[in-house]
Image (cartoon, coloured by chain):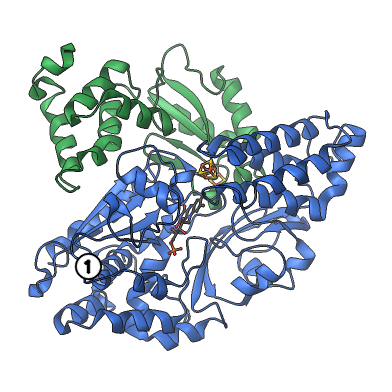
Amino acid sequence: MSALETKNRNELFTPEIRAEIDHEIAKYPEAESQSAAMAALRIVQDANGGWLTQERMDEVAAYLDLPPIAIYEVATFYSMYEHKPVGRNKLCVCTNISCMINNSDQIVEHLNNRLGIKFGEVTEDGRFSLKEVECLGACGGAPMMQVGRKYYENLTPERLDSILDELE
Amino acid sequence: MANEVIFKNRDLDRLWDIEQYRSRGGYEVLTRILTEKTPPAEIIDGMKTSGLRGRGGAGFPTGLKWSFINRSAPGDKYLVCNSDEGEPGTFKDRDILRYNPHALVEGMLIASYVIDAHRAYNYIRGEFWEPYERFQNAIDQARAAGFVGNNILGSGFDCELNVHLGGGAYVCGEETALLESIEGKKGQPRYKPPFPAHVGLYGRPTVINNTETLASVPTILREGAEQFRDIGVENSGGSKLFSISGHVKNPGVFELPMGTPFSELFELAGGMRDGSKIKAVIPGGSSSPVIPGEIMMDLTMDYDAIAKAGSMLGSGAVIVMDESTCMVKVLDRMGYFYYEESCGQCTPCREGTGWLYRIVHRIENGQGRPEDIDLLMDVQNRIRGKTICALGDAAAMPVAGMLRYYQDEFQYHIDHKKCKVGAGT
Ligand SMILES: Cc1cc2nc3c(=O)[nH]c(=O)nc-3n(C[C@H](O)[C@H](O)[C@H](O)COP(=O)(O)O)c2cc1C
Ligand code: SF4
Ligand code: FES
């Protein structure tokens, strides 16, 4: 038996996280708590500085009473889950068609130069990381990016500078 | 505007608040249906008359879809709304969630009543956090007003409404992948048949509709199915939200009658930016084959007209490109997208999208080979119609479309190892 299995469910996570996950479980029929796997991973990732470790994924599996592989599959299939450290501000820049023809290349280049990092990298101070993403459904505001839960649209290098200055 | 359905009351500054939504007749239809216990078959007939076709891309008639559910079969049934909005170029459902979430709540409740579903889910893409909060708030308000939960308005009808947030995967917009995703699994599409109407969420009968489809329902039933139908044209009833982006001056979402000339939509979007000239238009999301600007100017925005021109109305996502746009670069980026987003289940899609991307990518980078154009045609042909879900077709069709009209640009890239357009590579 693994160490996790011997652990009481109530010892996993903080009470706040447990409450949040339980709230998600309650959305689904009784026998279907696997449906809460995606939300549980999101909640745990958010509480863990924006990325998942194997230990955290195992805890999610134990909490939902699922084999760990079921959780690994989900956590690696969807692009919003991270498996390496990210910056406190994860800059997700869309480079799909509408953004591309509205100069997202220039936005990416500006970020590369100003932050000294490329896609998939984190600044040394841990403040920013950069990620290329597909169309975020905001093409009317191209070029655009997402940081945390917020969209920033109609980006220009100048606007980027003032946005970056405000992100802690 | 008289012909608006979804954006009808957009003059109100806080339409997302239930009081404002109700001040224009919101929740009246739901209330009437539940108190009068309107026979579901009657509502389905109305939806059929309205000519409403699914706004998610495939254009399947909504009334017909609802009629596939055997209402009297014992056990659970589910209603699922598709707010995954992942088709590149599409950004209309986000506006519905932000500005008119109650129309969607009401539409979902009516559809649930029709198919006798006691649980309904809205699958919202995970990146849409702010729209999700708006929509969740609308659910909470509707619950407080007695429209959601047990024994709604004393009618004996129970319906729970919840949001399931996605995790970033284009393929989850495909309806069966979406169901897998709600079940907490990887979003890999299922074989069809069986169709979701028989074996859907948790193996139970399920209806899946797009956000815009469901948000249209209350107005259709309130103002009359014929009236809605007559806004549009034959085979394309009603009005439609068009997301227009690219090189236009005022990109945005416009609601127009089906059958509106493209030129009118184009004008509403302010025409081309900076006096540039229109080159090409992707009329229905990145999966729909490109159409040259001069042909597009003579087309109307409805299913039949766009299909006749060799493309698709799809989700109504219009991407306008000016003369500085390199078509090889555009197809290169699209190829990358489909390659990245293929779920990998079927060989023609998994391998074929990789082939397409690598070939276009090397052409774009000046390493194209003389045989590459034939090879592209061959590969896209081997994907089409040979996969579990339509993502394979979605990846293949734009390739044939590009080569149909812009083969010379690809040839130039291959022959001269550089771009014909100049502004590209
Ligand atoms: C790869 C792929 C992606 C799709 N993405 C979406 C989407 O983001 N939103 C949507 O409503 N439908 C999407 N669809 C279409 C759905 O499978 C389905 O047809 C639709 O949600 C049904 O609703 P409707 O009949 O109201 O249009 C997608 C289909 C495919 C093959
Ligand atoms: S067509 Fe592509 S995305 Fe669809 S099931 Fe097959 S491999 Fe997956
Ligand atoms: S292409 Fe960037 S948001 Fe759609």
Q: How many marks?
A: 1
Kind of element beneath mark 1: loop
Residue A147 visible, this orientation: yes
Give the x, y percent position of residue A139: 55, 50
Residue B30 horizontal/vertical position (percent): 23, 76
Please name the color used to draw chain B: blue
Q: The C terminus of chain A lies in which quarter of the figure? A: top left
Q: Is residue B247 left or right of residue A69?
A: right
Q: Is residue B140 above or below residue A89?
A: below
The residue nearer to you, when weighing A141 against A49, is A49
Query: Where residue B217 sits: x, y (%)?
Result: 35, 73
Q: Which residue is mark 1?
A: B73
**From where the camera sits, is residue B133 visible?**
no
Q: Identify the residue at horizontal 64%, vertical 42% (top origin).
A: B334
Residue at point 66% right, 68% down? B307
| Residue positioned 19% across, 24% down in the render | A62
Res. A6 image quadrant: top left
Instruction: Say which colour chain A has.
Output: green
**Label 1 near ligand 1 (CB < 8 Å):** no
Residue B397 located left or right of residue B403: left
Q: Is B417 situated left or right of B206 in this image?
A: right
